[in-house]
Image: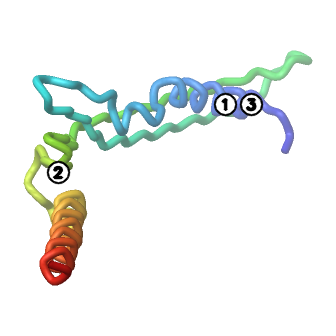
Amino acid sequence: MKETPVNKIMESTLERLRDMVDVSTVIGEPMVTGGVTLIPVSKVSYGFGSGGTDLPSKQPNELFGGGGGGGVTIAPIAFIVIENGKCRMMQINNYTSSADRAIAMIPELVDKVTELLKSDKKDENTSSETSAE
């Protein structure tokens, strides 16, 4: 690809956007308050555009006109709440679809299945000890 002033504008715009948005923007730093850990989750959207043109001139040097720009939107959407070893997700906005609701329920489902498996193991150990006596 030929190096042109438009390429430089696009690279500069993308580099600035990369500097603004990273992984810690989506999954934030955990905050601990009184035995409860809150981890913010955000939605990040970004876009950019650039363009330019060579302008005809009577001089030996070509004239170039161009520009670029971009934008970033960061919207908090949920918190992951960890309390007493249990994890759940609390959405800030209402669920927009059943898929959103299902995804939000995954941490709670994992906790319930873990508790169920632990209680089954305790029941097996208790019944085997009782039958041995």
Return the disc, 1 or 2, that comes first in the chain's sequence.
1
Residues at discs 3 and 1 in contact (Cβ within 8 Å): no
Residue 73 rendering spot, x and y as whole percentages: 32, 35
C-alpha gap between disc 2 and disc 3: 56 Å
Task: Give the label, 3 or 1, closer to the camera.
Answer: 1
Tell me which colouring the rendered structure shows. Answer: rainbow
How crowded is the residue under tag 2: few (<14 C-alpha within 10 Å), some, or many (20+)?
A: some
Q: Quadrant of the N terminus?
A: top right
In percent of width and height, residue 104 lies at 19, 58
Q: Which residue lies under the disc numbered 1?
A: 11
Q: Quadrant of residue 12?
A: top right
Q: Residue at x 70, y 32 (%)?
A: 6
Say which residue label 3 marks. 54
**Numbered badge on residue 88:** 2
Nearest to the observer: residue 29 or residue 33? 33
* Secondary element type, mark 3: strand
The reply, left or right, for residue 28 in relation to residue 2 is left
Which residue is located at x 33 percent, y 27 percent?
29
Whether pointer 1 and pointer 2 mark residues with C-beta atoms closer than 8 Å, the reply is no
Q: Residue at x 55, y 24 (%)?
A: 16
* Residue 10 as seen in the image, left or right of residue 24: right
Q: Badge 1 local density, few (<14 within 10 Å), some, or many (20+)?
A: some
Quadrant location of the C terminus?
bottom left
Please say if 113 is above or below 19: below
Task: Give the residue type that dot 3 points to.
Answer: Asp
